[in-house]
Image (cartoon, rainbow, N blue to C red):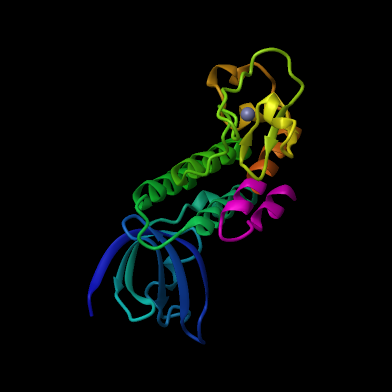
Amino acid sequence: MPTYNDYGIVLTSYSFSEADKILNIYTRNNGLVRAIGKGIKKPTSRFGGKTGQLSCCYFHFAKGKNLDILSDCEQINAFPKLRGDLIRLTYGMLFVEIVSSFAYEMESESTHIYELLYSALDKLQITEIPDLFSIRFIMEFLSIHGFRPQLETCVSCSKNISYEGSRDYFPFSSILGGLLCNKCSHSIDHKKININVLQLLGINDELNNIHPIKQEDIRLALELVREHTDMRGKNKIKTFDLVFSL
Ligand SMILES: [Zn+2]
């Protein structure tokens, strides 16, 4: 039976039988791997304690017919400071659910995605601003997939968007996934978003320190990325409900 090794982060796992579990793992070189952990639920399992959600390990797999088989693993990082903090843990679960929703086997950007997720979970352990940090993570993750909301040019006609002047709001098309110029906003359904929310989403770094950050704007930015990811991923991201209840 052919074997392979790879670094990976456990996204989710679920029971398969009395003693076995299926693990969905995002790996550095192979993208999404679904593997069966035989006997993993038994107290005597040598890797049961190392393969919880969010755990990063160096995995040894055997190629199976339908599912690969987890044959061993060495834990690299359990991100302990996430597990001891409900707020950070919730954002960590949000990250892995979003990665799951866009993950495929053998995708070409797997190394980039794995490293972004690893680094984000590691930094999430110490950041004092997990909500802002999460918006940046999601925007960077969407960029890798080519799904980042388009904020620099009109998503309909490609005209440059100007952030100058004192505009109350900017028209944003959820379906097209970006800002609209004034002309296009007359004929395309849109919602209105303010400059503070655009800054939180990462436009023009020079503007970043001009406005004080309001909790209400952070919530609006998170709601916008939620709608955006829900419309483009494989599944709706349920952990946003937990994030909004924090
Ligand atoms: Zn336009």
Mark count: 0
State the image quarter where residue 182 is shown. top right
> From this viewpoint, which residue is outermost toward the bottom?
18
Q: Is residue 191 above or below residue 89?
A: above
Q: Position of residue 67 (x, y in %)?
A: 39, 77
In-image side of 206 versus 31 (left or right): right
Q: Residue at coordinates 58% horizontally, 41% vertically from top-left?
A: 134
Q: Nearer the viewer, residue 83 or 179?
A: 179
State the image quarter where residue 191 is shown. top right
Q: Is residue 35 above or below residue 18?
A: above
Q: Nearer the viewer, residue 74 or 207?
A: 207
Q: Main secondary structure of the magenta part?
A: helix
Q: Position of residue 154 (x, y in %)?
A: 60, 30
In-image side of 164 versus 116 (left or right): right
> From this viewpoint, which residue is outermost toward the left?
2
In-image side of 219 versus 21 (left or right): right
Q: Position of residue 153 (x, y in %)?
A: 56, 27
Q: Position of residue 88 (x, y in %)?
A: 59, 47
Q: Nearer the viewer, residue 107 or 49?
A: 107
Q: Residue at coordinates 76% horizontally, 34% vertically from top-left?
A: 216
Q: Is residue 240 magenta?
A: yes
> From this viewpoint, which residue is outermost toward the top?
165
Q: Residue at coordinates 35% horizontally, 60% vertically from top-left?
A: 106
Looking at the image, can residue 205 be seen?
yes
If the picture is divided into quarters, which one holds ligand 1? Answer: top right
Screen quadrant of the N terminus: bottom left
Q: Is residue 168 magenta?
A: no
Q: Residue at coordinates 41% horizontally, 77% vertically from top-left?
A: 36
- Find the magenta span and give its range: 227-246
Q: Is residue 189 above or below residue 33?
A: above
Q: Is residue 6 above or below residue 45?
A: above
Looking at the image, can residue 246 be seen?
no
